[in-house]
Image: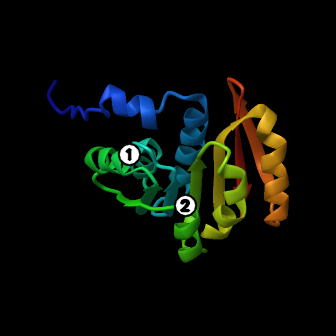
Amino acid sequence: MAGVTVVPGPAPAVAALFGDGTHPATRLARATLLEIVRRRPGVRVLDVGTGTGVLARAALEAGAGVVVGIDCASAAVDVARAHVPGATFVVADARDYLEQHGGAFDVVVANLPDPPLVGLVPDLAAAARPGGTLIVTGVRLWQAEAVSRSLARAGTAPSSVQAEGGWATFVVDC
């Protein structure tokens, strides 16, 4: 079709390992991220546990000015770099990266399992600028209380909690 650009997604095997955007937690995070970034174009976004870059791509498409994705899996970062050329992707341990980049982002999104998610919540909150937003997902509903406790220990609380298919997503105004 004229005027239509088709961007291939990650190979099926890679998507199975690192995500293709169809998981309920990813869908919730993506919808929230799109809404936030569209209201605040030009924001700096950090995607922790970026996998194949699904959320990084969404942030760019919504109008983010700078998008950084981090993941500890170099294979995932290689795929993200190939499929989301407008973002910067880094192979890094989340805790190390977050400690070095505190307060540097307007929006921080983390789509991670627990562990390590609950233990990272204070560092995730600290990576967001005052007035920024933290989106935390990747946990089952039965794990939601642990995330809420970790947010409280970080001195914050969710402004909303969404659920889909047994998965929870927390949105925090920092």
Badge count: 2
Residue 40: image location, x then y, percent: 54, 59
Quarter of the image containing the N terminus? top left
Residue 131: image location, x then y, percent: 67, 68
Residue 69: image location, x then y, percent: 44, 56
Specify the label residue 53 is tagged with.
none
Query: Taking the image as drawn, is residue 64 in sight?
Result: no
Q: Residue at x 66, y 66 (%)?
A: 123
Name above or below for residue 141 compared with residue 73.
above
Between the C-alphas of marks 1 and 2, the distance is: 14 Å
Q: Callout 2: few (<14), some (14-19), or many (20+) C-alpha neighbours within 10 Å?
A: some
Q: Residue at x 26, y 32 (%)?
A: 8
Quarter of the image containing the C terminus? bottom right
Q: Quarter-wise, where is residue 90 in the image?
A: bottom left
Q: Callout 1: few (<14), some (14-19), or many (20+) C-alpha neighbours within 10 Å?
A: many
Name above or below for residue 11 compared with residue 105.
above
Please, what is the three-letter code of the amino acid marked with disc 2?
A: Ala
Identify the image's colour scheme: rainbow, by chain, secondary structure or one colour.
rainbow
Check disc 1 and report the residue beneath it. 76
Residue 57: image location, x then y, percent: 40, 46
Please, what is the three-letter code of the amino acid marked with disc 1?
A: Ala
Q: Are marks 1 and 2 in contact (CB under 8 Å)?
A: no
Relative to 155, 23 lies left or right: left
1 or 2: tag closer to the N-terminus: 1
- Is disc 2 placed on a helix, strand or loop? helix
Q: Residue at x 18, y 33 (%)?
A: 3
Between 25 and 123, the one nearer to me in the picture: 123
Check disc 2 and report the residue beneath it. 94
